[in-house]
Image (tube, coloured by chain):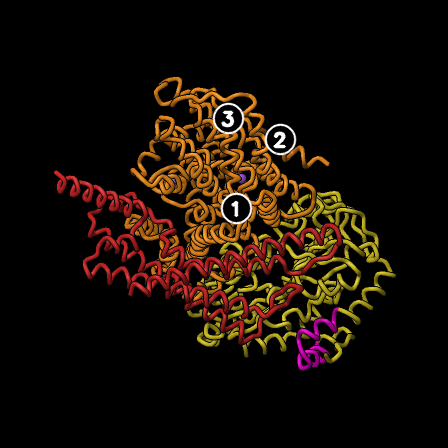
Chain colours: A red, B yellow, C orange
Amino acid sequence: MENVMRGVRRFTRWGYWFGGALTLLAVVVIAVDILMRKFLSVTIGGADQFAGYVMAISMAWAVGGALIDRAHIRIDSLYVLFPRKARLVLDVAAAVLFLAFFAMVAWRGYGVVQQSWQSGTRSQTALSIPVSVPQTIWLLGLLCSVIMGVLMLAYAVWRGLKGDIGAMQRTLSTRSAEEEVEEEIRDIEMRRGREEQG
Amino acid sequence: QDLPKTHFKVIGLNSPTPVSTVDELPFWRTTIPDASNGSITADITPQDLMGIDEAAGLRLLKLGVMDFAGLDISKMAGDDPRFEGCDLAGLTLTPDEARKACDAYRDVIDQQMQKNWNAKLLAFGGNNPQVFWCRDNISSLEDLRGKKVRVFNNSMRDFLSGVGATAVSMSFAEAVPALSNGVIDCAVTGTLSGNIGGLNEVASTLYAIPLGWSIVIQAVNLNTWNRLDPDVQQFMQDQFRAFEHKMWETVKLTTEEAVNCNTGKEPCTMGKLAQISIVTPGEQDEAARMKLLQDAIIPGWAQRCGAECAQEWNESVGKALGASAPAP
Amino acid sequence: MLLATIVILIVLLAVAVPVAAVLGLLGLSLSVLYSPMPLSLALGEIAWSASNNFLLVAIPFFVLLGEVMLRTGMAERMYNALVLWVPWLPGGLMHSNIAACAMFSATSGSSVATAATIGTVALKEVEKRGYSERLFLGTIAAGGTLGILIPPSINLIIYGVLTGTSVPQLYLAGFIPGLVLAGLFSLTVLIICLAKPSLGGTLQPSTWSERIAALPDLLPPFVIFLAVIGSIYMGWATATESAAFGVIAALAIALWRRNLSLRTLLEVFEGTMRTSAMILAIMLAAHFLNFVITAIGLTNQINSVITNLGLTPTQLLLAVVVFYLILGMFMETLSMMVATVPVIAPIMFAAGYDPVWSGIIIIILMELAMITPPVGINLFVVQGIRKHGTVNDVIIGAAPFVVTMLMMILILAIWPQIALWLPQLAAVR
Ligand code: NA
Ligand code: NA
């Protein structure tokens, strides 16, 4: 299970790199297109569409990583007032609901891709590429993101069931709560250390 | 006799267009309820207010997200190139010609929709002619050579490459400032929608060669349709026939009014008064347009659409207009 | 319907479900509860078209730009240079924070990126020099909001897209109010520190030669600003495309200064993707929610309620301010804009308010929303960087600036020319 979680983290990092590199490529393509248009009165044709596809794809591949890195915004004003166990329940619920929504997006997204395959839909730009190609990469990204999220959730619950509440919180909770926990632990350890010495 | 009580969910055309405000919204909100003595009612929301991508409308209709839909079909040419078949750039010069072309093409579109999109075609309509709004004075097609022009479909792109201009794709929202700052030299859009959208404030010349009419259709989801009482079907079909006629009348009316608005004359109820010089294409341009159609635009489209599709077109639109598409 | 919407929204938010999922699930539940049509079938098409909408491409680009500036040290050098230049006022570094936020805003399209970047470099200083931590945090949270007022701005682009208003005109309109608001923030700090000198921290004198020597560090932001804004008004690029120029400029400077290793670049990628995926997930869900609330007629319902009130323009403006003040406590700004501007803006236009001016007012209200609890993204960002204590410190520290922003709206209502002068100047050709 630890290995799985390590694998998940590595995989989501690759997702980031893939999306980041694509985004940088889109930046370059747009910049080149601007310059060509300005000075040569030529365009690549569809640079904007390419950048749009890149955005969709990179977002799909990174959205799971952002979940695992706990980067999605959660409103924790009330949450922090709950006791520790209740917070864990909310954490699990939050992750489940988030994954459920994006699983739904992916499921409906499959319909979109299928329709594009079926009608051989092409983009309405000079590039005129089959839309199903970027859509398929987008859908794969969504799927991988959801799968990674589910694995993370399974890992957290597994650690929780084994009694390692700290690890569960480090995986699922909002950052501020986690840091509070860490501080508590540090305090306890320091106190314990002092007691042992004294 | 009284029709059975029926309520429809409708997603309509883009709200700032005359075909939406003058024809479509009143059709669903007053004409249909009145004509049916209140038996048939509908909720209609323009698609732009719902944040729907224009190209997605037909797909949503197929899924049954709405019962009826107003659709800008040239935006769906990516799904099936037939959807731009009666609206190719420069193919028709007047609303009557455009109507004739689309009338001839009705069965082809309806068949495609029934076969692939679980939908039925009910009516054709259009917008104002799609023309060139330019920063500088343009007096002929030749003047467009080397210019950067914002266009939004493939057949316009073929037209531009034929006259030696550069096609730039950008959203309408960015076209106004882009024209103002000189990112582009011209933008192709409707004579009235450009006026409403603010192009009149940044363009000096309107070069009035129609690159299409932004043809729209009204369609119904087949499941909805087949569930309807035969009387209701008959009623709706009659209503849509009248609606179609009204849409084409509006195209004519607003096309004339757009000329008024853009040259600062009344009556101008739908747009803003502006001072733009309107350049009408000369005889030389007419010859150039015919040549472009035969050499670039129709063959380019036939290439995208395939041999069978070109054949269908020759037997319908081609026959009506006296043009022919080469087999790709 | 309205009540159910609010209840579901508050419950989901209160139990700390991620905002993106809250908006999406709210959309799904409203569609199940109130729509005869299977609206959820549209989720795929809407998700795809929202995710690949070119007008939103500016979001990842601006996030990327901010990451490059942060991780190659450009932002830190800029901050340190400004620290030397603005230390003599009571409040010391807090004025530098605001100046740095304003300057960084001129390169960044996002308030989150601005607060995060300046926060990361500024918070190192707070312990060293004995400032009131709360007010110090407040200057970053509030100053960071300038990111969407001073051009370039993602939110102004979105406003322009939603209302059909020219983005370059909006950019010009945001410029002077942005500087005025930055000035008012500084004034706020000054007044507070004069009233209670213990909050002001220890001043660190700097010499003129130090200040001159630091000037080159202010150059990179200036170059990036020129690349982004200049390329629009020189007629090279659209407002969306110009973000790409900013990224290229930042990368070029970093390469030239030899600050860009592969390792840094990969870190930049990670940071960019993490943040943009978070924002775009919210945008995607907000699009779907907007689709649902329009389809079930909620938008019309709200619209007719407001129209039936028969308000005078001044009352309407007041109502809009109160509306966004309340909604802004609970909602994230991008989703709030996508969900409300299509309804609110036309009502304001119909009452005779200028679209460009209305845009600036709405943007300032969005800035306000970023620092009001319980949901204020800049509060979270600053707290996120700080990594100790609770978010309440930031909330209290940012509170004075809420008043300042309301003042700014009053000023703009009395003198609309502050926003409209530059765009009108540019329109005369
Ligand atoms: Na900015
Ligand atoms: Na808030």
Res B65 quadrant in image: bottom left
Instruction: Tell me where the magenta segment starts and ends, as one range.
Output: B297-316
Q: CA distance from mark 1 to mark 2?
A: 34 Å
Q: For this view, does A196 lie left or right of residue C347?
A: left
Percent of width and height locating residue B304: 67, 73
Q: Decide whether residue B306 is among the magenta residues.
A: yes
Vertical position of residue C218 compared to residue B16: above or below: above
Dot 2: element: helix
Vertical position of residue C26 compared to residue C111: above or below: below
Res B6 quadrant in image: bottom left
Name the subunit of mark 1.
Answer: C
Counting residues from the N terminus, which is met first, the one under dot 3 or under dot 1?
Answer: 1
Vertical position of residue C425 compared to residue B109: above or below: above
The residue that mark 1 highlights is C68
Q: Residue at x 78, y 47 (%)?
A: B136
Residue C168 in sight in this render: yes
Amino acid type at circle 3 is Leu
Q: Residue at x 41, y 60 (%)?
A: A12
Please tell me the numbered disc located at residue C84.
3
Amino acid type at circle 1 is Val
Name the subunit of mark 2.
Answer: C
Counting residues from the N terminus, which is met first, the one under dot 3 or under dot 2?
Answer: 3
